[in-house]
Image: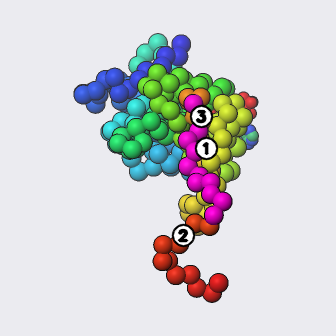
C-alpha cells in the first residue's frame, strides 16, 4: 500500500520521525542524480527547511520493508514579491520509474498549490530530460517560458535548461507593454555608432 505524507506537517521536530529517515533513504541514490540537482550536496534538513515536502511511501510489513518511492516539493523562494509563485520539484526512486509515479506527484503538487492559493507554478528542467518535460508540458499543460542555453556545466558538459510555467488562475494576463505611436524619449542616454 502506498500513502502520501506531507513532511512539513511534522514541524517543529521532524528529525526523529520515520518520514525523515525515509526521505534520507530516498535521497541516497539520488544525491548524485544529474537531473535532480535539488538533492545535490544537501541533507534532509536542508531540503525540509527550503520547501514543503510530500513523500510517497510504500508501506511494508516491517519498517525495513517500508521505503519512500517518490518525492515532490513546493518551494516559495520570495515570500514578499513572489508569494504567489512556487517552484516545483519531483523525483522518483530509480527502481520505481515508468510506473506513473512522476505523473501522480505532479498532479498532487498542482492540487496542493491550488489549495495554498498559489497563482503560478514554475519548474526548471534540463532540456534533455524528456520524461519530465513530457509530464509537465504534454500532460499538465506547462508552457515553456525560457530556454537557457549552456546554463549548467556537469562533468565538463554544458547543458541547456528550460523554464516552464503553469498559471493556476484564469484572470487576464497583466499588460506590461506600453503601446505608443510616438518614439519613446531616450532621456539623454547617448547611443553610439547609430
Ligand atoms: C522524471 C521522473 C520524475 C519521471 O518519473 P516517472 O515515475 O518515471 O514518470 P511517469 O512514469 O509518470 O511518466 C513518465 C513519462 O515519460 C515518458 N518518457 C520516459 N522517457 C521518455 C523519453 N526518453 N522521451 C519521451 N518520453 C519519455 C514515459 O513514456 C511516460 O509517459 P507516458 O505516461 O505518456 O507513457 C523520473 O524519471 C525521475 O525521478 N528522474 C530524476 C529526477 C528528475 O529528473 N526530476 C526532475 C528534475 S526538475
* Residue 148 visible to an observer of this rendering: yes
Q: Where in the figure is residue 37, as x and y percent of width and height?
A: 50, 48
Separation of residues labelled 1 and 2 (CA atoms): 35 Å
Find numbered disc 2 in the image and state the secondary structure of the residue it sits on.
loop
Question: How is the model colour-coded?
Answer: rainbow
* Magenta-tinted stretch: 171-182
Q: Where in the figure is residue 79, as x and y percent of width and height?
A: 36, 40
| Residue under the image location 55 percent in, 41 percent down | 174
Find numbered disc 3 in the image and state the secondary structure of the residue it sits on.
loop
Comparing 128 with 137, the one in front is 137
| Residue under the image location 39 percent in, 44 percent down | 81
Does the CB distance between marks 3 and 1 fall below 8 Å?
Answer: no
Separation of residues labelled 2 and 3 (CA atoms): 29 Å
Identify the mark nearer the N-term, 1 or 2.
1
Separation of residues labelled 3 and 1 (CA atoms): 19 Å
In the rendered image of this protein, does residue 169 appear above or below residue 32?
Answer: above
Q: Where in the figure is residue 68, as x and y percent of width and height?
A: 48, 27
Of the two numbered discs 1 and 2 in the rendering, the one whose residue sits closer to the viewer: 2
What's the mark number on residue 172?
3
**Residue position for label 2:** 185
Find numbered disc 1 in the image and state the secondary structure of the residue it sits on.
strand
Ligand 1 picture quarter: top right
10 Å crowding of disc 2: few (<14), some (14-19), many (20+): few
**Residue position for label 1:** 164
Comparing 139 with 174, the one in front is 174
From the image, give the main secondary structure of the stretch colored magenta. loop
- Is 173 magenta? The answer is yes
Is 91 situated left or right of 28 in this image?
A: right
- Is 114 magenta? The answer is no
Amino acid at each position: 500500500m502506498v500513502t502520501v505524507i506531507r513532511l512539513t506537517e511534522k514541524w517543529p521536530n521532524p528529525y526523529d520521525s520515520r518520514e525523515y529517515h525515509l526521505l534520507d533513504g530516498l535521497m541516497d541514490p539520488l544525491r548524485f542524480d544529474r537531473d535532480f540537482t535539488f538533492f545535490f550536496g544537501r541533507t534532509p534538513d536542508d531540503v525540509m527547511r527550503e520547501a514543503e515536502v510530500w513523500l510517497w511511501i510504500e508501506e511494508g510489513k516491517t519498517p525495513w520493508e517500508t521505503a519512500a518511492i517518490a518525492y515532490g516539493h513546493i518551494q516559495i523562494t520570495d515570500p514578499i514579491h513572489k508569494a504567489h509563485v512556487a517552484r516545483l520539484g519531483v523525483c522518483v526512486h530509480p527502481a520505481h520509474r515508468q510506473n506513473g509515479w512522476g505523473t501522480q506527484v505532479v498532479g498532487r503538487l498542482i492540487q496542493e498549490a491550488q489549495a495554498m492559493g498559489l497563482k503560478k507554478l514554475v519548474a526548471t528542467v534540463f532540456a534533455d530530460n524528456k520524461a519530465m518535460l513530457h509530464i509537465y508540458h504534454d500532460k499538465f499543460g506547462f508552457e515553456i517560458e525560457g530556454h537557457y542555453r549552456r546554463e549548467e556545466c556537469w562533468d565538463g558538459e554544458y547543458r541547456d535548461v528550460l523554464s516552464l510555467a503553469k498559471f493556476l488562475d484564469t484572470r487576464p494576463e497583466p499588460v506590461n507593454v506600453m503601446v505608443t505611436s510616438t518614439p519613446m524619449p531616450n532621456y539623454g542616454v547617448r547611443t553610439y555608432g547609430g
